[in-house]
Amino acid sequence: MKPEYTVGWGTLALLNAGLAQSKKRGGLNWFLISLFLGPVATFLLLTFYKYPPKA
């Protein structure tokens, strides 16, 4: 694997962790998932958003 891909994949994993935390999900879990799934994890985070329960 080229170093450029490794840096990009790691950056995407960090962005996904931040996105997950902003949606009240576990950032570390999504970081680890993103290391394996990459862009698929981003798609899952953006598509399947749990809305907060209505009061």
Image (cartoon, grey):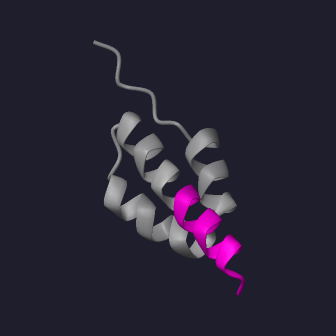
Q: Is residue 14 left or right of residue 46?
A: left
Location of the N terminus (image quadrant):
bottom right
Magenta span covers which residues? 1-12
> In the image, residue 22 lies at what x, y percent?
39, 35
**38 is higher (above) or lower (below) than 22:** below
Residue 47 in the magenta stretch? The answer is no
Q: Quadrant of the C terminus?
A: top left
Q: Where is residue 45 drawn, in percent x and y?
A: 56, 46
The residue shown at (61%, 75%) is 6
Which residue is at a point 57% across and 76% down the rendered structure image?
A: 36
Q: How many marks?
A: 0
> Is residue 52 or residue 32 the one in the foreground?
32
**Viewer-proximal residue among 2 and 35:** 2
Q: Position of residue 34 (x, y in %)?
A: 53, 65
Q: Kindly indicate the quadrant of the structure image that contains residue 24.
A: top left
Tell me the residue at 69%/73% (across/down): 5
- Residue at far bottom of view: 1
